[in-house]
Each structure stands twice: as C-alpha cells, then as structure tokens.
Image (cartoon, helix red, strand yellow):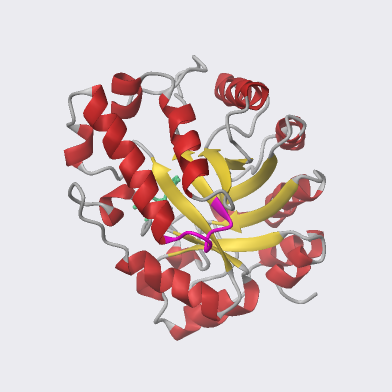
Amino acid sequence: ASTLGAAAAGSNRYFGTAVPTGKLGDSTYATVLDREFNMITPENEMKWDTVEPSRGSFNFGPADSIVNHAAAHGQRMRGHTLVWHSQLPSWVSSIGDANTLRSVMNNHITQEMTHYKGKIYAWDVVNEAFADNGSGQHRSSVFQNLLGNGFIEEAFRTARSVDPSAKLCYNDYSIENWSDAKTQGVYSMVKDFKSRGVPIDCVGFQSHFGSGGAPSSFRTTLSNFAALGVDVQITELDIAQASATAYGDAVQSCLDVARCTGITVWGIRDSDSWRTGENPLLFDNSGNKKAAYGTVLNAL
Ligand code: XIL
C-alpha cells in the first residue's frame, strides 16, 4: 500500500492523526489528511472547556466540523476526552461538593456521548488520571478529591449506558515502560475492572516520546495489557526530532501485538505539532514526507 491508512488497513488496523478544526480549510493540510489517515482525534474540540464552557451550555460546533469532515472522507473518529483534570473549566474545578460534581460529571458524559452516538469508534472516557510521582496512585484532581478512587469506574459505567456501541478506553502518558509505577498502577486498575465487570474495552498509550523513542519494554507493556482482555492503541504518537528508526520501532511494537488495533500520531506537519521546535512528526512544514514516514510505511 502507498499510504499510511491503507497500509494499516492491510492488517485490520487504522492509522490516525489529531486534527484541529481550524486547519480543515488549509488545502495542503487537508490533502495530506485525506490521503494518509483513516482515523481522526479532535485535538482540542471535544474537551470539556470547549464542549461545556458553562454549566448546561453545550457547544458542539467545532467538533461537529471535524466529525462531518471525517464522515465525508470515510474516516473514523476517536472521541477525546470526557473526564480529564486539564482543559477543564473553572466552574467544574471549583465545585465543592460530591453530589453536585457526580451529577455534573455524569451529565457531561451523557450529553456529549448522546450528541455523537453511533459516530465514535472509541472514547477516551478518562484521560491522565494517574500520578507521575512514582506512587502508582491516582493524581489529585477535583474528581479524585471529591468522588474518590471510584470516579473512574463511575465514568465508565455511565459511558457504557449511553453508547453501548462505542469502545471505552482509558488513556494516559508515561505508561509505556513496563516497570514504571504509573504503568503498574494503570495495569492494576484494568485488571480489577476486568475482574469485576466494570466496562472497559481499551487502553490508549499516548506515546509522547523523547528523541530515543519508545522504551525497550513497550512491546511487553502492550502485550501484557492486551492479555487482560482489552484492545490497546498508540493514541498520540510524536517523537522529538522524529528519528526514522525510533518511529519504525514504535510502530512495529504495535504490529507485534495482535490486539494493538491502531496508531494515531499527534499532528501531521511539524508546524502542526503542540511540541514547538521539536519537529516530532512525519511531515515537514510544507507537507512533504520525512524519513520517518518511510520507516513507518515500511513497518505497516
Ligand atoms: C494538547 C493539544 O495538542 C494542544 O493544542 C493543547 O494546547 C493542549 O493539549 N495529552 C492529551 C492531549 O491527552 O489532549 C494533549 O493535547 C497532549 C497531551
């Protein structure tokens, strides 16, 4: 195959990218998007601060533009994200009592998932809930602090009841190295959810890597999570300076795991990246393929 999406489809996988609404009108950008990618994650437009900027006022316009583009070009959608401590409006983070927050969280999940019902392949139901401090525990957030450890389970149960056809994922960064406490914390949670019947279908590994790329245990990590009975995906891949070898290896790690169902890069051209100055993507600022594009296509 001669494109990333078609090559990934050869093994029943997808190849996706993050897309901001504001770039859909850039014809160079849209040409590469529609030629190469068959899965789209809205870069910011499905986050709480955009979707529900004040309580009960929903703004789906920016994300609708992306969903409509995807439908017109045969691309599937990853919903990103329903419950996250970041890009969270202050009216939510300043809620002071558990009952209010519980109903606000469940209503947000219900309204957003209902609006997109039937149009989303997988939802990042909860994003980045684990701490970076080596404890393997949840991070501090308004959700954790008011609702306790059970907030993640509650979010997944609510999500399943709203759109039973969407895959429900937990998504996080720095969970690629098997021995890290954060990885082990997420693994324990997924194992517990599967053993108790809490509805979870997939785990997203963001995979924002430094110039060395993925840790050598990445395959092991993907395969150990998959063995719990969930799909795994690489959801936000970017690699500082985009080493061709590092990109090829990261993609190969997914291909080596049967339940690794797809790979998404976090932007198209270097100039589209949130990591300013790191040139971490597969296309240069003019939309030309970089060396890493070749190793990725070759691996797929
Ligand atoms: C980033 C976007 O790329 C930026 O445009 C925005 O300013 C901040 O968020 N983890 C995630 C993504 O789950 O949503 C983040 O996206 C990158 C880190």
> Which residue is at a point 45% across and 51% down the rendered structure image?
80
Q: Is residue 88 visible?
A: yes
Going by the picture, which residue comes out furthest to the top?
135
Q: Which residues are magenta?
A: 116-122
Residue 218 in the image, given as x and y percentages of width and height: 71, 36
Image quadrant assignment for residue 296 = bottom right
Q: Is residue 152 magenta?
A: no
Residue 67 in the image, given as x and y percentages of width and height: 46, 69
Image quadrant assignment for residue 177 = top right
Going by the picture, which residue comes out furthest to the bottom?
27
Residue 29 against residue 228 in the figure, above or below? below
Residue 202 in the image, given as x and y percentages of width and height: 63, 41
Q: Nearer the viewer, residue 298 or 166?
A: 166
The quadrant the C terminus occupies is bottom right
Residue 12 against residue 147 in the figure, above or below? below
Q: Nearer the viewer, residue 140 or 92?
A: 92
> Which residue is at a point 74% across and 54% down the rendered structure image?
248
Dominant secondary-structure state across the stretch colored magenta? loop
> Which residue is at a point 52% across and 73% down the rendered structure image?
70
Image quadrant assignment for residue 95 = top left
Residue 114 in the image, given as x and y percentages of width and height: 41, 55
